[in-house]
Image (spheres, helix red, strand yellow):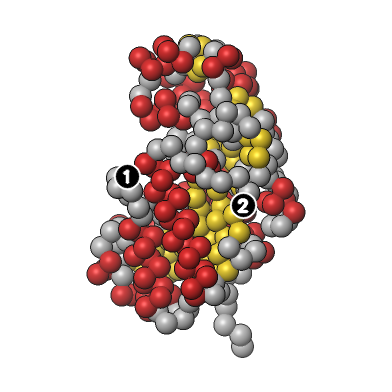
């Protein structure tokens, strides 16, 4: 009898759990967690929990041992919130190399923030990265690590660049919460284009990349939506029966909004997703936010 296909998930949060629900009837799933309290939850969901902390490489020997069983790794753990690099990804890759049997496939969940501000340009994955924040620079560092690992080990590495994730059953994942707070958006002349993906479609994109991703390939994991941030929240308000958010100028935003929110309002881009559709063969359940928000 052939061995079951085994997937190791690193960072089994909301998206990782959605992936687990998709594949558990067919695949064996190992899930790294740094929290002993989550082990029972992961077992109930159908995964084999592996206790270890990427911030503490000395805690990863068991991960190195179990990595020998995995044909694929899905890496969804974010970098630390400080510094210029990503020691968590470095620790993971060292643990995989120590296992002596590298997985055939590795999928890394990055961010579209690696492009910085593109002044509303439409583009595909061939555009060079130009990170404007330390947060994005850490992601570029992680992408470099995993792609180098693929060339060194022979693993087929896919990098999914992920925009804003939404879903009604995702914590903080529905615009209704922000609308109820009355958080403003920019006036049309100052507004920025944003990109989106429903959490269920992102989970399906992760599985498709594991199955069909090309070696050392970057893919935009985004839907077909082409809306400004203000247009997105106006649409959400109309669908929820709530007032549209107030509009403010960029100058007013600098005085009223947090640096984190202001950073998201300072980058404008429109991402092409043809690789997602053609190479990974993904047919989106929610092609635009209109379908996604209507269903929530």
Question: Looking at the image, which residue is at 64% across and 62% down?
Answer: 213
Q: Which residue is mark 2?
A: 219
Which label is found at residue 238?
A: none
Q: In which quadrant will I find the C terminus?
A: top right
Q: In the drawing, does residue 280 fall left or right of residue 260?
A: right
- Name the secondary structure under disc 2: strand
At horizontal 50% and vertical 53% (from top left) the residue drawn is 109
Q: Name the quadrant of the N terminus.
A: bottom right
- Quarter occupied by residue 25: bottom right
Q: Which residue is mark 1?
A: 81
Instruction: Name the element at disc 1.
Output: loop
Observer-nearest of 125 and 222? 125
Report if residue 240 is visible in the image.
no
Spatial CA distance of label 2 from label 1 is: 24 Å
Q: Residues within 10 Å of mark 2 (few under 14, many from 20)?
A: many
Closer to us: 240 or 154: 154
Name the residue located 68 percent from the left edge and 51 percent from the top edge.
276
Image location (x, y in percent) of residue 250: 46, 15
Question: Residue 197 at what x, y percent from top left?
Answer: 59, 41
Q: Nearer the viewer, residue 146 or 229?
A: 146
Q: Position of residue 168 (x, y in %)?
A: 54, 36
């Amino acid at each position: 009898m052939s061995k079951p296909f085994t997937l190791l998930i690193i960072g089994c949060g909301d998206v990782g759990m959605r992936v687990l629900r998709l594949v558990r009837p067919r695949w064996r799933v190992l899930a790294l967690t740094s929290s002993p309290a989550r082990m029972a939850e992961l077992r109930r969901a159908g995964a084999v929990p592996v206790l270890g902390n990427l911030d503490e490489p000395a805690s990863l020997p068991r991960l190195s041992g179990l990595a020998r069983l995995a044909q694929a790794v899905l890496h969804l753990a974010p970098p630390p919130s400080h510094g210029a690099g990503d020691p968590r990804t470095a620790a993971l890759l060292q643990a995989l190399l120590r296992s002596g049997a590298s997985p055939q496939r590795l999928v890394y969940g990055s961010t579209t923030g690696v492009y910085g501000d593109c002044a509303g340009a439409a583009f595909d994955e061939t555009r060079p990265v130009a990170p404007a924040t330390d947060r994005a620079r850490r992601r570029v560092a992680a992408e470099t690590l995993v792609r180098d690992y693929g060339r060194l080990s022979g693993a087929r590495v896919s990098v999914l660049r992920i925009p804003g994730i939404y879903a009604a059953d995702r914590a903080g994942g529905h615009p209704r919460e922000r609308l109820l707070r009355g958080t403003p958006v920019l006036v049309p002349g100052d507004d920025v284009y944003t990109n989106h993906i429903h959490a269920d479609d992102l989970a399906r994109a992760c599985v498709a990349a594991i199955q069909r991703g090309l070696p050392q390939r970057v893919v935009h994991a985004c839907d077909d939506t082409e809306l400004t941030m203000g247009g997105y929240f106006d649409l959400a308000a109309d669908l929820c029966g709530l007032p549209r958010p107030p509009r403010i100028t960029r100058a007013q935003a600098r005085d009223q909004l947090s640096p984190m929110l202001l950073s998201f309002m300072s980058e404008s881009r429109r991402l092409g997703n043809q690789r997602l559709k053609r190479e990974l063969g993904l047919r989106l359940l929610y092609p635009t936010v209109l379908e996604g928000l209507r269903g929530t």
